[in-house]
Amino acid sequence: MTKFATFAAALGLTATSALAGGYVAPVVEVEPDVVDEQPASSNAGLIVPALLLLGVVAAVASDNNDDDDDDTTTDGDN
């Protein structure tokens, strides 16, 4: 009986220490992928010349020629 009690006590002590806390699943931490993205920007290389061209066209279109010295009549005898 003494051998049985010793065996039971040893088995009980080892069993509780082996199962203390239960099973914990391993946690795998995944680091997010870092993507280098260029910020969206307007292409000033095309906008500035387009605005300058628009200004030149507007200046030419608004050119008001009030000179009466020019003989621009079309009487057919040029």
Image: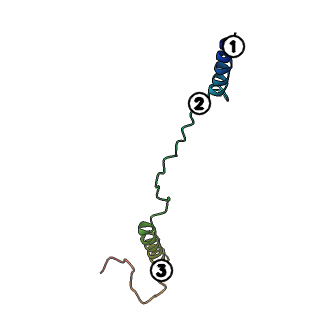
Q: Which mark is residue 61?
A: none
- Which residue, as the protein is rendered here, is positioned at the far front? 2
- Which residue, as the protein is rendered here, is positioned at the far left? 78
Q: Position of residue 25 (x, y in %)?
A: 59, 30
Which of 61 and 32 lies nearest the eye of the viewer? 32
Q: Amino acid at mark 2?
A: Ala
Q: Position of residue 61 (x, y in %)?
A: 47, 74
Q: Amino acid at mark 1?
A: Thr
Q: Which residue is mark 2?
A: 25
Q: Amino acid at mark 3?
A: Asp
* Residue at left offset 47%, top offset 51%: 35
Q: Position of residue 75 (x, y in %)?
A: 36, 78
Which of 13 and 66 lies nearest the eye of the viewer? 13
Q: Is residue 11 above or below residue 47?
A: above
Q: Which mark is residue 63?
A: 3
Image position of 68 (left or right of 20): left
Which of 61 and 72 lies nearest the eye of the viewer? 61
